[in-house]
Image (cartoon, rainbow, N blue to C red):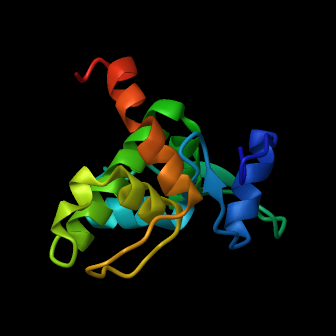
């Protein structure tokens, strides 16, 4: 899945290798965000994978190809999404300590990158997440 649209997997690695920083998988995690979560120590670095060299020289190993494979795995993608939520919670903790208890703000920050500040607002996605927050607790058995 690239930017919410089903695309044959073989096309996804070349798109990234050409420098496209796209969002992948169920959590729509950007490739650069995944790399940032690895660099922050919140996710392990995936093993390199073989990809095609489009200049005609054959195949080569690519760290980003391995990352794309990890992001296309729904189980791994959800872990990257959770790592990003932790990353943003840590970033915002000093300016907005209650972010962990504000699903509207946390979902907004997940959806669009904001600079930490003491009076953040929420967008439509954040309000949607807040509206369904209690139901998610019930569905996940967290009550």
Tell me the quarter of the image containing the C terminus: top left
At 55% from the left edge and 61% from the top edge, which residue is drawn?
A: 31
Q: Quadrant of residue 55?
A: bottom right
Tell me the quarter of the image containing the N terminus: top right
The picture places residue 94, in percent across and down from the top left corner, at: 15, 76
Q: Quadrant of residue 23?
A: bottom right
The picture places residue 6, in percent across and down from the top left corner, at: 79, 40
At 47% from the left edge and 62% from the top edge, which residue is drawn?
A: 108
Position of residue 47 in the picture relative to residue 27 (left or right): left
The answer to which of 45 and 95 lies nearer the viewer is 95
At 32% from the left edge and 27% from the top edge, which residue is drawn?
A: 137
When the figure is inspected, residue 139 is found, relative to residue 64, above or below; the finding is above
When the figure is inspected, residue 40 is found, relative to residue 84, above or below; the finding is below
The answer to which of 18 and 60 lies nearer the viewer is 18
Residue 45 appears in the figure: yes
The picture places residue 142, in percent across and down from the top left corner, at: 24, 23
Position of residue 81 in the picture relative to residue 62 (left or right): left
At 62% from the left edge and 50% from the top edge, which residue is drawn?
A: 24
Position of residue 5 in the picture relative to residue 95 (left or right): right
The answer to which of 12 and 89 lies nearer the viewer is 89
Q: How many marks?
A: 0
When the figure is inspected, residue 74 is found, relative to residue 49, above or below; the finding is above
Residue 58 appears in the figure: no
The picture places residue 39, in percent across and down from the top left corner, at: 31, 66
Position of residue 81 in the picture relative to residue 8 (left or right): left
């Amino acid at each position: 899945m690239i930017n919410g649209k089903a695309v044959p997997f073989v096309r996804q690695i070349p798109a990234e290798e050409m420098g496209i920083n796209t969002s992948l998988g169920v959590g729509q995690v950007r490739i650069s965000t995944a790399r940032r979560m690895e660099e922050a120590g919140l996710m392990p670095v995936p093993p390199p994978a073989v990809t095609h060299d489009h200049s005609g020289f054959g195949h080569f190993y690519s760290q980003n190809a391995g990352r794309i494979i990890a992001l296309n795995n729904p189980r791994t993608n959800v872990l990257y999404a959770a790592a990003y939520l932790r990353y943003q919670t840590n970033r915002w903790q000093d300016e907005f300590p209650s972010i962990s208890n504000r699903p509207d703000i946390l979902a907004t920050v997940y959806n669009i990158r904001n600079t930490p500040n003491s009076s953040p607002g929420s967008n439509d996605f954040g309000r949607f997440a807040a509206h369904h927050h209690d139901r998610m607790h019930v569905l996940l058995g967290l009550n």
